[in-house]
Amino acid sequence: MSLLHTSFLNAIAVAVRMLAMLGLNKLLALYVGPAGYAAIGQFQNAVTMLTSFASGAINTGVTKYTAQYHADASAQESVWRTAGTISVTCALMVSVLIALFHQQLAVAVLKDEHQSRIFLWLAATLVLFILNSLLMAILNGKKAVSLYITANIATSIVTLLATWVLARVWGLYGALVALSINQSIVFFITLTLCLRTNWFRLNMLFGRMDMEVARKLTNYALMALVTAIVVPLGQLLIRNHLVNEFGWNSAGLWQAVTKLSDMYLMLITTTLTVYYLPRLSEIDNALQLRNEIVKVYRFILPITIIGAVTVYLLREWLITMLFTPEFLPMLDLLAWQLAGDVIKIGSWVLGFVLLARAMTKSYIITELIFSASLVLITYALTPLFGLKATVIAFFINYLIYWITIAMILNKTVYR
């Protein structure tokens, strides 16, 4: 499927997801305010780390090898069976650990033991959460774009409805419960979509593992685990730093700025995931790789720049519409954040090559270094720039990352 066609179909899902996020942000802004917004960010980071451990962190590998073995149904089934067995085993173990230590998790993540039942909700539904992620990875690898997009739309709608109902009844606690269970609910929709194809059966996810496939998936597990740990951990450390320096409200403003970026970049980031990663997995020579990267840059970067400029020009209206007037102080952070977004997307186009080529060592080292440097630069700049240090550090860090990845690929992949 072409980049343009994929982007068009993906735009439909993004439009639905955008509308859902508009409603979701407004609900959260009204029901929990900036301080609650920061708490939700903390919980989302924790969920990212926990679910990565629970899945065995192999979903990127599932997408890669499903795409690579596109002409070999038997090999694909071996990948799915091995991945399903690993994921369910890991999910059950992590569920037990979350249930046992739910109070400690609440204190560490939310600084509030009274919110500990949130983690019990997560523990109870974690297996379904992980199976949904696995099915999504399979759909992506099969290039079943319409099904993948339908499942994403279902996730958006379920998240919006669950958050609206539960936040209205229970406030912040209800919003956190919705974030715990939404993908577990969507699992039944995604499973139904998969079962309607002529290439999938539920028993393909379980059975005897292929140890050679497990070994291959391990490389992706290492990369995914590093990302799933160090990126959210870095955000947790930055958010804790902001809370200590400026309070929960200021931390909520930073969280809102990053959420605004996520929304307008959604078309771009999901297109990279849906089209670019499977496509890179198919390419087997340096010339094709260079051409694909250039093609993606020509398409992605202009759209990113247009999006960033549009958001900046409409900044006050967007903040008022998406959040509430209480969030208007985030205007001071927006220019650096938007400039950093352009740099981030540019670096990701190259960063995906490390992932698709299973360049485990390079990927892990750069993730560790640049996740740590983002935290350190933020800490260093805070006395000089206050809250704005977060977005200035974001820009600087991704600029250096882009240059570094370009140098790595020039020395290894392009030759």
Image: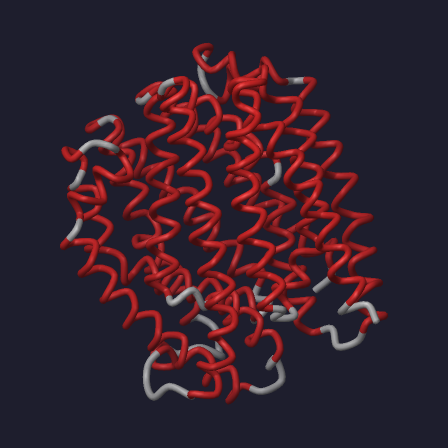
Q: Position of residue 329 (x, y in %)?
A: 51, 12
Image spot of residue 311 (x, y percent): 65, 24
Q: Is residue 66 left or right of residue 325?
A: right
Residue 344 as seen in the image, left or right of residue 107: right
Which residue is at 76% across, 69% downward? 412
Q: Is residue 206 left or right of residue 92?
A: right
Front-most of residues 372 and 28: 372
Figure label count: 0
Is 241 above or below relative to 401?
A: above
From this view, report whether residue 37 is shown above or below residue 399: above
Q: Position of residue 364 (x, y in %)?
A: 55, 61
Q: Tell me, what colour scheme is on the image?
A: secondary structure
Q: Which of the 4 image quadrants contains residue 353?
A: bottom right
Image quarter of the C terminus: bottom right
Q: Residue at x 32, y 85 (%)?
A: 207
> In terms of image quadrants, where is residue 29?
top left
- x, y (%) of residue 204? 39, 81
Determine the residue located farthest toward the top in the rendered image.
325
Q: Quadrant of residue 111?
A: top left
- Front residue (pair 235, 311): 235
Residue closer to the observer: 403 or 41: 403
Residue in the image at 69% along x and 67% along y: 280
Q: Quadrant of the N terminus?
A: bottom right
Q: Residue at position x 51%, y 61% from top? A: 147
